[in-house]
Amino acid sequence: MNTKVFKKGEVVFREGDQGTNFFQITEGTAGIYLHYGQADQQKLTEMKPGQYFGEMAIIDAWPRSATVVAEEELKAIELTGNDLVDYFQEQPDKIMALMNQLGDRLRDVTAEYDEVNAFIREKQNAGAEKKEGFLAKLLKYKSVAGLSGKLAGCTAEDEIRRKDAGKGAEAALQVKSFSKGQVIFREGDEGTYLYQIHSGSVGIYSKYGTAGETKLTTLYTNAFFGEMALVGNDPRSATAVVEEDDTTLECFRAEDMEALFKVNPMKVDMILGHLSNRLRRLSLDYVKACAKAAEDA
């Protein structure tokens, strides 16, 4: 780990580069750009002191997805993949800081994705183009596209919370077996845990138990689910139901992460990888939705 200083306007790394390091800003701001220096350049956001950038290239070994430029004199701690273990050992609170930042990005992209899908539905209505803000949204999505019923009853998570009540992170319940048909959590519930499937399968449903019930997907061994509760205590966006007897799940709380890292740093790396991968997939879905919104424009 070392501190790097970048002059105003200096490029830290470019879109498409293979990443071998990432940064935490200590002073200044960094601009995040798509197609930097080209006619269709677009500034996505600014990163400020305390925030990380470039971490996704380290976590899941993908090329850089954007160009980062110092907006003013920028000082940042440089870390490589090899530094990450030492960094977390020295500052275990940074584990959740990094996870929370990925969660914030997931939340932001989800909001944008929901907005563009609402626009697509609105666009199908006669006279929609006359509404205030319609043209501005259309231009926004065209620009992006060109860049490439809560039910009553006790749930399994309620039971886990009761068993964990008053326990420290080191005593938290980690692995539990579930029966077919058991509800892990319900859409709209307050979330506490991230889960990983060790064996069996779990179905994810929208409007579970109602006339509008829709099965979104089935998850199998090694899959994670429920991550937004870990990084922000967000209400559950769907219902999770066990699909096989003797399905076993590992359960994680935010307060478990530091203790977990001490005994199983690879598991923390897997969780970070899951968050990063979900963000990448959601971003691709968002761009595709923008392309659909801009059709015939």
Image: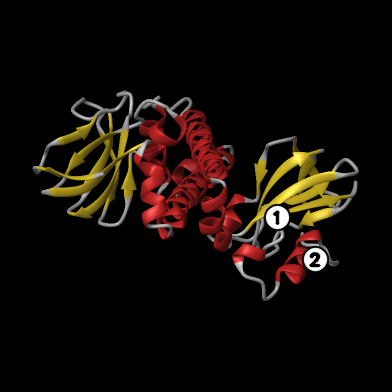
Q: Residue 189 occupies which quadrant of the picture?
A: bottom right
The residue at the point 26 percent across, 54 percent down is: 48
Identify the residue position indicated by label 1 in the image.
174
Q: Which mark is residue 159?
A: 2
Relative image position of residue 111 (x, y in whole percent):
50, 50
In this view, the residue in front, 285 or 166, is 166
Q: Mark number for residue 60?
A: none
Q: Nearer the viewer, residue 25 or 246?
A: 246
Label 1 CA crowd tier, 10 Å (few <14, some 14–19, many 20+): some
Percent of width and height locating residue 34: 30, 32
Q: With respect to residue 297, does 188 lie above or below?
A: below
Q: Amino acid at mark 1?
A: Gln
Q: Is residue 293 left or right of residue 242?
A: left
- Numbered disc in front, either 1 or 2: 1
Res. 6 visible in picture = yes
Q: Position of residue 242 (x, y in %)?
A: 83, 46
Residue at image point 49% right, 47% down: 106
Residue 118 seen in render: no
Give the residue at x 58% y 37%. 124
